[in-house]
Amino acid sequence: MSPQARAQTREKLLDGAIRTLTEQGIAKTSARSVAAAAGVNQALVFYHFGSVDELLSEACRYATEQRVARYRERLAGISSLGELLAFGREMHEEEREAGHVAVLAQLLAGAQTQPRLADATAAGLSLWVAEVEKVLVRVLAASPLGEFADPVGLARAVAASFVGIELYEGVDRDGAGRALDALEQLATVAAALDELGPVAQRAVRHRLRRATRG
Amino acid sequence: MSPQARAQTREKLLDGAIRTLTEQGIAKTSARSVAAAAGVNQALVFYHFGSVDELLSEACRYATEQRVARYRERLAGISSLGELLAFGREMHEEEREAGHVAVLAQLLAGAQTQPRLADATAAGLSLWVAEVEKVLVRVLAASPLGEFADPVGLARAVAASFVGIELYEGVDRDGAGRALDALEQLATVAAALDELGPVAQRAVRHRLRRATRG
DNA sequence: CAAGTTTTTGAGCGACTGCTCAACTGCCCG
DNA sequence: CGGGCAGTTGAGCAGTCGCTCAAAAACTTG
């Protein structure tokens, strides 16, 4: 067998794992169902990855790295909270059928009781967190009110919340849409605060300093 | 058998389902594992509920109604975003071992491909959404800036985000804690805006009106 | 072409799944 | 006391699970 064949089969299995995870859910993702989605024999899961958990761990990394790399440029162009939210929405719609983000939601659910999977999922999610953090650092640095928020914590909150909203969308698409609308509206409000005149700006900053000192 | 015995066994199974769901995850929740946690025979799952899915659906409703009823009074006393976030954190810590909220996260993950479960989960989550919405309506009505936010959408965003942060906590407790810190800080900022003097208040409102009109 | 290595396969193991069922228990009512 | 019945049980069925393994197939090298 050629060395490319090995990589090809591994890739088929990784893609099959991601498709199965998003189409059938973590509960129905098995060596046989993944192999069927990949169009190969189920024994190859164990030949190439050793165990199902290991395959899922690598699939998590594979899917996340792929997506992060794909969107890195667009993320680099984001300069406001509104744009960040709009980006999240667009990316989610683009990838809906491929489900490369929902993978994380399914794996997070499965990871609650499987330490091996928990590590891989945490690592995968942290790739997104790191990207969001970069954006937030930039956005907050550009905002006169940026000093009143913690980009590190917010990046985690944004990434985790997105996972939750994604799961919610699976059972109530309209509700999830309205939730995203409300958040975008909130981002608009935040942006408007940045554009206050100098007098109002100073009053706001003064009040915020007093409030966040105690 | 007395009619109370029937209700007793059902309750044992419902509690067993919730415990299994949170301790083992959706993937390892089966008629036998739930029955073992409940201390009864596995056949009773089918005698009393007809199927495992039906048991999980009822367990979702059972757990959510129980929790919402238990916290309704405290929710009624909340009058700011900061208090709402602090409440979420407290409730989560109180129930960590019982896991009555994490149930929703596990069920949401399982519901992505099981329509029967999706309905029950959506219904369960909507109980929380309704409570959060009441709080938000009150909080926003009391805030001079309340008109610039949509309580219906925000309630859904808050509830879904909480589910996501809960899942995130399962793989990175410190990260989740920092995320909650950042959100509380943000709530402090929002509260501070409410307490601006009349001149700054008017400037802010004027700017927000212009920004959210377009 | 033959020998050797890597990859792929189908069959099969024990354990588990959802679910059924005949048999059994304990209670109410005649 | 004796049916009748709600509730409970363990055994068992067909199917899937993770995983193993010997053998076949595909490819590389001499």
Image: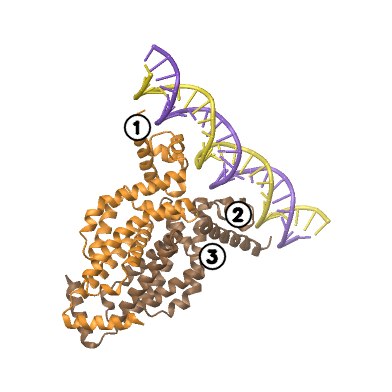
Chain colours: A brown, B orange, C yellow, D purple
Dot label at residue A35: 2
Chain letter, disc 3 residue: A
Q: Which mark is residue B3?
A: 1
Q: Which of the two residues, B34 or C8, is positioned nearer the viewer here? A: B34
Q: Position of residue C18 (x, y in %)?
A: 50, 42
In which image quadrant can residue B140 be found?
Answer: bottom left
Taking D26 as reference, is B21 above or below it? above
Quadrant of the drawing holding the N terminus of chain A: bottom right
Q: CA distance from mark 3 to mark 2?
A: 17 Å
Which chain is home to disc 1? B
Secondary element under disc 1, as helix, strand or loop, is helix
Give the CA separation, mark 1 to mark 3.
Answer: 51 Å
Residue that mark 3 sits on: A98
Position above or below: B121 against B84: above
Residue A46 — which label? Answer: none
Residue A120 visible to the viewer: no
Q: Nearer the viewer, residue A6 or B166?
A: B166
Q: Could you say whether the residue bearing mark 2 is in a helix, strand or loop?
A: helix
- Relative placement, left or right, of A7 versus A166 is right
